[in-house]
Amino acid sequence: MAILKFRVYFEEDDSVYRDVAIRHTQNFLQLHQAILKSYEFDSKHQATFYRSNDHWQRGKEITFQKYDKTYKVEPLLMESTTVGSQTADPNQKFVYVYDFAKNWVFWVELINISKEENPRIDYPAVVRTEGIAPSQYGTKGLVSDKLAEMEEKYDLKTGAEGFGEEGEASDAEDMESGEEGESEATEEI
């Protein structure tokens, strides 16, 4: 059984991408769900794939459902269209559009075909993640919640040992004892 590996680029920043491996017998609905999961998007909105050429021009449409719009050619449905049936070229490309109001666009490019599947992987699977995904709603901070919690845990509090205000008496005492130590050391030599 052939395993197809697609690189899914975020259109606005090609340094942000996810590699998704899928069996050629699985359908576009499963690929759609894997892409959304890899970018941490919900599945509440409309979506469609377009077969594409090397210039990312949109061709035959493979859609989640038939929407209220005029089609030049009847679209294929994701649920009944296998990925392998639309992958004729070893460099096959698709344009994936999610949430027509926000117009999230991803470029999906076939990067590898393997005859052997990994028995430890449940396909479709995200096999590589690069870059910080865009936030579907609003802004996503560069600092994750776990990192923020760790910073709070180790955050230095006022009065913590070794850290005081500049010019405090303890600093003056340290300086005096340091000077005495130096004079004792020179007397011994």
Image (spheres, helix red, strand yellow):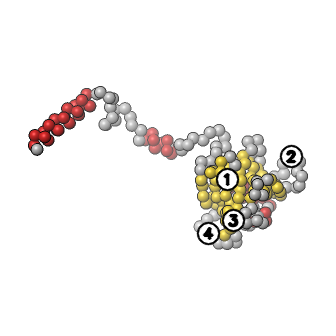
Mark carried by residue 49: none
Crowd tier of the residue under label 2, counting other residues whose Cα lies within 10 Å: few below 14, some 14–19, many 20 or above: few
Calculate the distance from the C-alpha at mark 3 to the C-alpha at mark 4. Answer: 12 Å
Nearest to N terminus: mark 4 or mark 2: 2
Write down the residue under mark 2: 68
- The answer to whether marks 3 and 4 mark residues whose Cβ atoms lie closer than 8 Å is no
Regarding mark 2 in the picture, which secondary structure is present there?
loop
Crowd tier of the residue under label 1, counting other residues whose Cα lies within 10 Å: few below 14, some 14–19, many 20 or above: many
The kind of residue on which mark 2 rests is Asp
Crowd tier of the residue under label 4, counting other residues whose Cα lies within 10 Å: few below 14, some 14–19, many 20 or above: few
- The answer to whether marks 4 and 2 mark residues whose Cβ atoms lie closer than 8 Å is no
Q: Residue at x 64, y 55 (%)?
A: 18
Write down the residue under mark 1: 9
Q: Mark 2 or mark 1, which is nearer to you?
A: 1
Write down the residue under mark 4: 118
Calculate the distance from the C-alpha at mark 4 to the C-alpha at mark 2. Answer: 41 Å
Nearest to N terminus: mark 3 or mark 4: 3
Calculate the distance from the C-alpha at mark 2 to the C-alpha at mark 3. Answer: 32 Å
Regarding mark 3 in the picture, which secondary structure is present there?
strand
Q: How many discs mark residues in the rendered view?
A: 4
Crowd tier of the residue under label 3, counting other residues whose Cα lies within 10 Å: few below 14, some 14–19, many 20 or above: many
